[in-house]
Amino acid sequence: MTARIFPVRRLTHGPKFHFKAYYDIQPWSADSRYLLCMQSDFQDRPPAADDRLVLGMVDMQSGEFIRLAETRAWNFQQGCMPHWLPGAPDNTVIYNDRLADQLCAVILDVRTRKQRVLPLPIQAITADGRLGASLNYARWAEYRPGYGYAGVQDPFHGQAEPRDDAVTLMDLDTGASRTVATYGEIARLTSDRDGRKGSPMHLCHLMFNPAGTRLAGIVRWWSPHLAHNVFSTKLNIDGAVPERRHCLWVANTDGSGVEIVVNDGLVSHADWLDNDQIVAWANDRYDHLPAYLLFDVRDKSSQALGRDLLTDDGHMSYHPFKQAWLLTDTYPDRRLMRTLKLYNTRENREVVLGKFHSPAGLQGELRCDLHPSWNRAGDQVAIDSIHEGGQRAVYAVDVGDVDKL
């Protein structure tokens, strides 16, 4: 482990609270002038149906927070899923909203403020900006507080495995959509060796591979005996809870082939290395212990990464150009410190970028994970943190040239 100090710069300031998009979403504009983030009036309770979130961007030169729009579709873990839209990544963003009690996506020109509304919310978009992947946010809100949206009803409420619920792909130009995977298809492909059959399931965490030819996602089955813990905002119940049953699935975006890649008791965060390989915190099929595993979706083979160093679940992403380097974080340790780190997959070596205190009072769906994201050049990392005065804010960590670490 390398001992070194990496400069950390606070980008947002009170009295309101700020956080950026999820760890696998690029927050910087193409010219690096602006960083996309969100602003809330509170941080001590979950958002209700009428609570609004401000979408904005930080001017990296002046430090000004520039207000862009408001949304009623948000949460503290993934916000409103804001992305810079490929094709116009300096002036166009896409984000989720709720209009007339219907979830939708909005494409916004940040200069003219001109908007275009699409009929479905997004969870992920392809690197070329042609397709968006959508899922049932109302069901996600019911079974995993902190990720879905308030104010919408699940049309499949009460159905454990709603055969007609689905992940859909939406054309971001026309708004036309088509089904890529249904609950029924995925349920039929999973085994019942851990007693999951008949338990309520929900789809979450969609991710396109770099070419946009494959879509991956996670399915979780509800364990009724965890209800009290999961719905308590005092506890940090995450996707890594072993008593919950998970699987990682992939499908081709041309509409063919839904397959199960991981069918064990645990799958948490993931990130594509390339078009065929995806890393995930998951149970190893051999010793059944959780680890960072790199899966080849073609033959379902896997290899463990950094068993002696990557010992905790985290939000991982590969360097945009130098893919020997994996960025990740940890949940709070006994001293309530979250660690931000890099891991070199070729040398089995880690570099700690910083440790950040996480107050005990904000846990569960209100917690402030670091959710680290690379900038486009791969020399800075954006994080959310609450280590200064207990206020949720966005920071930039200067990494420099990773080849020199």
Image (tube, rainbow, N blue to C red):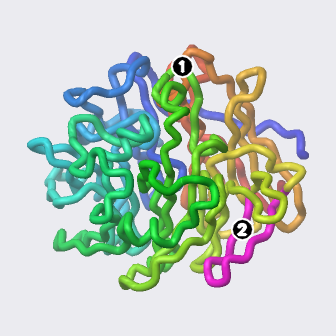
* Residues rendered magenta in the picture: 292-306
Tell me the number on the disc at residue 294: 2
Q: Residue furthest toward the left? A: 100
Residue occupying image coordinates x 52% and y 74%: 210
Residue 251 locus on image (x, y percent): 46, 76
In this picture, residue 384 sits left or right of residue 215: right
Left or right? Give the position of 103 relative to 196. left
Mark 1 neighbour density, 10 Å: few (under 14) some (14–19) many (20 or more): some
At 55% from the left and 60% from the top, the residue drawn is: 376
Quadrant that contains the C terminus: bottom right
Q: Amino acid at mark 1?
A: Lys
Instruction: Please tell me how many numbered marks the rendered image carries.
Output: 2
Residue found at x 71% / y 23%: 336
The residue at the point 32 percent across, 72 percent down is: 131
Q: Secondary structure at mark 1?
A: loop
**Is 313 rendered above or below residue 323?**
above
Looking at the rendered structure, the secondary structure element under dot 2 is strand
Nearest the camera: 58 or 187?
187
Q: Is residue 107 above or below residue 80?
A: below
Q: Is residue 300 magenta?
A: yes
Residue 398 visible in the picture: no
Residue 260 image position (x, y, % from top left)? 56, 72
Judge left or right: residue 71 versus residue 371.
left
Judge by depth and name the residue closer to the eye, 294 or 320: 294
Q: Residue 213: horizontal and vertical position, in percent?
A: 46, 81
Disc assigned to residue 234? 1
Residue 310 inside the magenta-drawn segment: no
